[in-house]
């Protein structure tokens, strides 16, 4: 298990636990912890409603072209540290990750 610090749209931070051996991505881990997140496309890098801003200095996987294109289209790429949570696999390297949920994740 790893811990991810998730700040929601109201500014409240939740420390969620995520298993590293179940093939989860960060969006799925947030859902499993029952925090509200739209994630309309279900993790296909096609909606950007799982966007977040990474606050910690963890080394993250490189962005795929799909992720980059989607963030670009959603006009959030210029916010430094923007990523799609569904494109970040939960791994031991992400223990202690701190993220701010992006505006597009809410209703
Ligand atoms: S859930 Fe749609 S892009 Fe991540």
Image (spheres, rainbow, N blue to C red):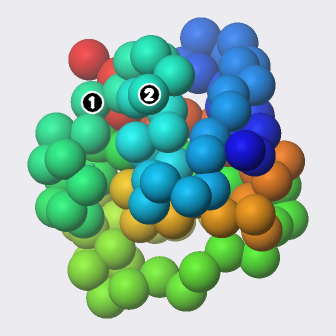
Quadrant housing the C terminus: top left
x, y percent for residue 70: 26, 68
x, y percent for residue 59: 77, 76
Q: Residue at x 26, y 39 (%)?
A: 39
Q: Is residue 83 in view? A: no
x, y percent for residue 71: 35, 65
Quadrant housing the N terminus: top right
Which-is-in-front pick, marks 1 and 2?
A: 2
Up the image or down, 65 lies above or below 35; here it is below
Ligand 1 is within 8 Å of the C-beta of the residue at disc 2: no
Give residue 38's mark: 1
Label 1 and label 2: CA atoms lie apart by: 13 Å
x, y percent for residue 82: 54, 59
Give residue 32's mark: 2
Q: Residue at x 47, y 54 (%)?
A: 22
Q: Residue at x 51, y 65 (%)?
A: 89
Q: In the image, is 41 to the left or to the right of 33?
A: left
Judged from the image, the secondary structure of the residue bearing numbered disc 1 is loop
Ligand 1 is within 8 Å of the C-beta of the residue at disc 1: yes
Give residue 30's mark: none
Q: Nearer the viewer, residue 17 or 37?
A: 17
Q: Nearer the viewer, residue 107 or 91?
A: 91
Up the image or down, 28 lies above or below 105; here it is below
Q: In the image, is 82 to the left or to the right of 92?
A: left
Q: Residue at x 71, y 19 (%)?
A: 14
| Badge 1: residue crowd in 10 Å (few <14, some 14–19, many ≥20) | some
| Badge 2: residue crowd in 10 Å (few <14, some 14–19, many ≥20) | some
Residue placed farthest to the front in the image? 21
């Amino acid at each position: 298990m790893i811990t991810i610090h998730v700040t929601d749209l109201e500014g409240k931070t939740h420390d969620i636990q995520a298993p590293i051996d179940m093939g989860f991505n960060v969006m799925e881990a947030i859902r499993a912890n029952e925090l509200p997140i739209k994630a309309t496309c279900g993790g296909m890098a096609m909606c950007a409603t799982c966007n977040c801003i990474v606050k910690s200095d963890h080394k993250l996987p490189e962005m795929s072209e799909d992720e980059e294109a989607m963030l670009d289209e959603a006009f959030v790429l210029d916010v430094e540290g923007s990523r799609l949570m569904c494109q970040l696999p939960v791994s031991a390297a992400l223990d202690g990750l701190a993220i701010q949920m992006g505006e597009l994740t809410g209703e």
